[in-house]
Image (cartoon, helix red, strand yellow):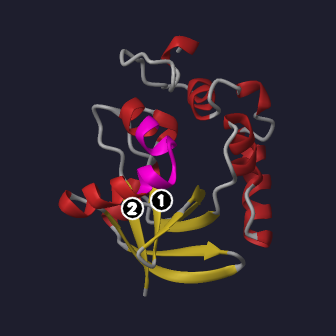
Amino acid sequence: MTSKNLPGSGSTDHERPTSTAEKEEFSSGGNRHMIILRGKTGLAIDTFVLWLTGYSLMTKQYALANGTGYQPTLLLYTKGAKTGAQRRCGLPYFMVDGCYVVRGSNGGGPTDPHWCHNVRGDSEAKIRVKGRTKHVHAHVSTGEERVALFEKLDRMSRSTSQYQQMCAPRELPLVVLREV
């Protein structure tokens, strides 16, 4: 993936990122050199700090690389669709109509992230937000609900359209997490 394919370059002809390095390049707005926390060790550190403090160092570094503000981040706990084992990941979230909403961007990659498959397989999940764990019902929005959510998220964050463009032709999953 070259810099001409990055968001904001005006090019509509793009290659979707497939490798971790390409996803980092896209998600950092071309400033991959600013991404210090990475890989399994970076994720482990970030998960621990996020669980403890409610603040994601990983999200912060991508925000700095993109020149945007920090987006609040939660830990999502799902049941593995294939294994049934508990899985967790840190995800920036948006509050929309009293619900948490997360985007399944997978760094602009060609496939939905693993946690989207898990949510489709089992809608019961947990989130940890600001030091509190909550049970939620999760679903991938569709139809009119998705259209309305996309418009709201697009107004809240310019990266929503950028991720949808990079994900195309797959539809960027917008997942609603409603407290039980």
Query: In percent of the image, x 35 and y 72: which residue is there?
Result: 123
Circles 1 and 2: CB distance less than 8 Å?
A: yes
In this view, the residue in front, 111 or 68, is 68
**Identity of the amino acid at label 2?**
Val
Secondary structure mostly seen in magenta is helix
Q: Is residue 82 visible?
A: no
In this view, the residue in front, 33 or 115, is 33
Q: Does residue 102 sit above or below 30 in this rendering?
A: below
- The x and y percentages for residue 29 are 62, 29
Q: What stretch is highlighted in magenta?
A: 153-162
Which image quadrant: the C terminus?
bottom left
Q: For residue 91: magenta?
A: no
Query: In percent of the image, x 34 and y 54: which residue is there?
Result: 151
**Residue linked to disc 1:** 102
**Residue linked to disc 2:** 175
Query: In percent of the image, x 62 and y 26: which residue is there?
Result: 25
Q: Count neighbours of disc 2 (C-alpha within 10 A) and say few if under 14, some if 14 to 19, many if 20 or more.
A: many
- The x and y percentages for residue 168 are 32, 32
- The x and y percentages for residue 88 are 58, 62
